[in-house]
Amino acid sequence: MNRLICPKRVLRLLPGLVLLLAGLFSSPAIAQGNTNSPVPSAKLKVLNREVMIFRANLGTYSPEHRVDAAKLRIEQAMTKRADLRVESLPWDGKVEMRVHGQTAFFIMPGDVDELAGETLNSLRVTTEHQLNQAISELEELRSHKYLIKAVAYTIVATFGLIIFIWLVARNRRWVEGRLIKLTARKADQIKSHSLRIIGLQNSVAVLRSLTSLLFWLVIISAIFLWLEFLLQLFPLTRPFGEELHKQFLVTLGKLGQSALEALPDLCIVLVIAGLARFASTANRRFFVAIARGTSKSRFFDPTTAPITQRLITLLIWLTAIIVAFPYIPGSQTPAFRGISVMAGLMISVGSSNLIAQLIGGLTVIYNRACRPGDYIKIGEYEGTVASIGFFSSRLVTRRNEEVVLANSQISNGTLINYSCLNETVGVQVPLTVTIGYDTPWRQVHAMLLEAARRTAGLKSKPEHIVLQRALSDFYVEYELRVALEKPMQRPEVLSELHAHTQDVFNEYGVQIMSPHFLANPPQAAVVPKEKWFAPPAKKES
């Protein structure tokens, strides 16, 4: 036993016993510290105005309990009056906030947001200012005189807004008319009548759009100022009015900052647009000279020059847009990308037919199948080509009908061009008749050539020829080939040729066997000359 209680052994065990006792006595505190998770903060608001944020416990009271207690004490203090509305007193490492001489709440060191750079003193000053303003608004809310005055200001401001909007709307047309008259005076200085009309129309449209935009900007600004003024009149809504004003200024600041940041990119976009405009202008001048005949090219002619000019201009601007796209402000935002994807999807889904029409138009143009002004026949349609576009072409018939044909229909169908070779070798138009074997073929040749000589609108070169195309069972098929001076007069000239053919055959007593022949009649089926002008026909002068 004496060995167990030896002083030396006790001295050796003493540090361990101390640590054990300390651990036993401090275990509740340690447990409490382990459970001391971040306390949820609570905002103290008086009449929608934020006074301060409680972040720490006060004894056993949480920040939410502190907020409820502070509101109750402020309400109780408002029933009394003192020289000072709000005062702050440092006390024992914390700050006591008083309202009308009564304690409202305490600012604890744990309430300081050190990450935001706050100190206990700066938080005291800010809280004192906010609380002083909130107490002042409470006094205004309980003052009937102030509320009546605020209502009167509201009525006056509302009437003023209505009168202002009425005056702006009434004078809008006057301002617009003055601007249009000024533009018309400037437009009168343009020498070209067509350019003057086009410039005036575009200017009027632009001016009306600008005046409408300016009108709505003024109206919206006036309504915004009216709303901000009304919100700041009443204590309950004053914080919202101040926040609205603050957000407006912040938004303007962000817009200004964004505009400044976007200036380098905008300069690049303007440079690219300037280069594209210069290239398109040079391209237009080159192909306009070819179209007018003042310049010649080995690869382009006046027919293909306008379309080629449009294609190259379109390619120039598409290239400029692709190059400038990354520098356009907002092009990297998800909204802009979404719109781009949607536009690309729409184009890819709906462009198959358009691409087919475009390829058909390019095929027609660069194959030189026809040109504007050519007289052509496509299927059942026959007329003069009015225009050839990228996707469709327009044809004007002899009945003055405008037919719009898809370029794919022209490129995939059979096209007969009566004008292409007419200026050189001449295009021969056939006339077919069938005559019996009892009529000498030489006589038939002579009569057909005589009918051609009597017809106006036919070329003398190449010479008219007659061919015997078939020796059928009952008749011989003859074909007269003639060349028209103007292909677009083809229906009228052929009609006159048919009439002269009938006259010549009747003069010489030769029967035309068309369209059917079964047997020789007792006498020739011809019209005597004395009956050529039977009523109601009149004799030609």
Image: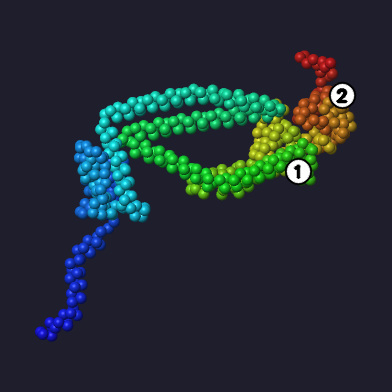
**Does 251 sit left or right of 288 as displayed?**
left
**Residue in the image at 79% along x and 15% along y:** 538
Tell me the mark number nearer the camera, choosing from 2 and 1: 1
Say which residue appears at 12% left-offset and 82% top-offset: 5
Q: From the image, which quarter does the C terminus lie in?
A: top right
Give coordinates of residue 283: x percent, y percent. Answer: 71, 42
The colouring scheme, among rainbow, by chain, secondary structure or one colour, is rainbow
Q: Residue 350's quadrant in the figure?
A: top right
Q: Secondary structure at mark 2?
A: loop
Question: Is residue 343 shown left or right of residue 290?
Answer: left
Residue 230 in view of the camera: yes
Residue 536 left/right relative to 227: right
Q: Which residue is nearer to you in this view: 313 or 278? A: 278
Three-letter code, disc 2? Tyr
The residue that label 1 is drawn on is 300
Secondary structure under the numbered disc 1 in the rendered image: loop
For mark 1, does the 10 Å Cα neighbourhood hold few (<14), some (14 to 19), or many (20 or more) residues? some
**Amino acid beneath label 1:** Phe
Residue in front for this viewpoint, 214 or 150: 150
The vertical placement of 50 against 3, above or below, is: above
Q: Position of residue 95 (x, y in %)?
A: 26, 50
Quarter of the image containing the N terminus?
A: bottom left
* Residue at mark 2: 508
Taking the image as drawn, is residue 514 in sight?
Answer: no
* C-alpha distance separating marks 2 and 1: 55 Å
User: Residue 245, position in %: x, y?
Assistant: 40, 38
